[in-house]
Amino acid sequence: MWRSDSGPRREPEVNEGEVFGFLGPNGAGKSTTINMLLDFIRPTSGEISILGHEPHSEPRLVREHIGILPEGYHLYDRLTARKHIQFAVELEGSSDDPGTVLKRVGLTDSENQTVGEFSKGMRQRLALGMALVGQPDLLILDEPSSGLDPNGARLMRQIVREETDRGTTVFFSSHILEQVEAVCDRVGIMNEGTLVAVDTVDELCAASGETSTLVISVDEVPDTSNIRGIDDVTDVTINGTTLRIGCSNSKIKATVISEIERAGASVIDIDVERTALEDIFVEHTNKTGAREGKP
């Protein structure tokens, strides 16, 4: 959690056990925020609290509970993958088995290979494995999908879910919005040093006035008059035995299904098409004229 003393800015709290997506254009302040969380730089005002401790006054206590995958990490080309994990185990004072960690990140067959022979994706998975050592209470992942192929990205998402299942909090900073949408419980969007939005993707869609579309296949087309009368339904169109129902809140899905069945039809399949996170991101970062090209 961090707070600002200067002006009416947001005071977000990242909840225990959630995956919090952290978004923003180049130069928005994402890297600066992560550096403040790690006490690499100090805030000029406001305060930061991690697990009840302030990074600048209790850095060792904070770092004991954090696993970090930085964007600009460094690995040693002449050392094997196993040596890297063993180093992380010794540094953390952990009892983790290096072989088990390497298995989690899909590098069992390469554990005795030197990192100089690794692809970018393999390096990324190794760095993630090092961040997992010691079972941290907070994982800070900065661009964790960088260099990963689709299988690697899926494995990364699986690991994030496994970590949250055991109660880990994950701070997930990424430019790959599809990955953020797939894995994050809530997202925060930063622009020009200010957090301009914090919520679930569904709630951000609703707040932006955008609609979701329920695409429902039925065995026969029902009378849709009652469906059209449901609060938050904005439009109903019919194409054969497929209903497309626009709604300002996708949570009304159960109500829509009940009305379809009450009208005598059976639901065969249902899908939700909603505003992409990219559209929400553009809306919030264009409001104040995001700058391009700043690191």
Image (cartoon, helix red, strand yellow):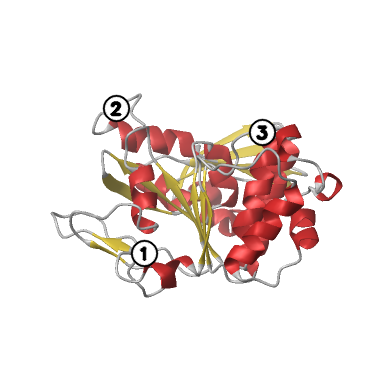
Extreme-top residue of the structure: 293
Q: Decide: marks 3, 2 in contact (CB < 8 A)?
A: no
| Quadrant in which the C terminus appears | top left
Q: Residue 243: image x %, image y %?
A: 64, 39
Direction from residue 271 to residue 175 in the image, left or right = left
Direction from residue 245 to residue 208 in the image, left or right = left
Q: Residue 210: image x %, image y %?
A: 41, 39
Q: Is residue 74 visible?
A: yes
Residue that numbered label 2 is attached to: 291
Q: CA distance from mark 3 to mark 1?
A: 33 Å
Q: Mark 3 packing: few (<14 Cα in 10 Å), some, or many (20+)?
A: some
Q: Residue at coordinates 24% horizontally, 55% vertically from top-left? A: 43
Location of residue 98 (image quadrant):
bottom right
Q: Is residue 258 visible?
A: no
Q: Residue 122: image x %, image y %?
A: 71, 39
Residue 286 position (above or below residue 227) = above
